[in-house]
């Protein structure tokens, strides 16, 4: 065991961190897509 394994900075589960990163990225990109679609629908109505 090396010295870095004895004194870890974060003891969180990696799968939870990966899932949260995926969810945050997905929600962010979805928000950009939805906003773009709203602008397109509004511009088509005018």
Image: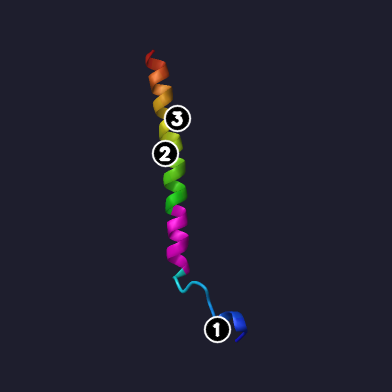
Q: Residues within 10 Å of mark 3 (few under 14, many from 20)?
A: few
The residue that mark 1 highlights is 6
Q: Is residue 21 above or below residue 2?
A: above
At horizontal 44% and vertical 51% (from top left) the residue drawn is 24
Mark 3 vs mark 1, foreground winner is 1
Q: Which of 5 and 37 is in front in this view?
A: 5
What is the x, y in percent for residue 13? Answer: 44, 70
Image quadrant containing the N terminus = bottom right
Q: Residue 26 carries which label?
A: none
Q: Residues within 10 Å of mark 2 (few under 14, many from 20)?
A: few
The residue that mark 2 highlights is 31
Q: Distance between the residues labelled 3 and 1?
A: 48 Å
User: N-terminal of the two: label 1 or label 2?
Assistant: 1
Mark 1 vs mark 2, foreground winner is 1
At horizontal 42% and vertical 64% (from top left) the residue drawn is 16
Provide the major secondary structure of the magenta segment. Answer: helix
The residue that mark 3 highlights is 36
């Amino acid at each position: 065991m090396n010295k870095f394994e004895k004194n870890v900075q974060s003891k969180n589960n990696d799968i939870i961190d990966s899932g949260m990163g995926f969810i945050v990225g997905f929600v962010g990109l979805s928000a950009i897509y939805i906003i773009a679609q709203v602008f397109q629908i509004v511009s088509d109505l005018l």
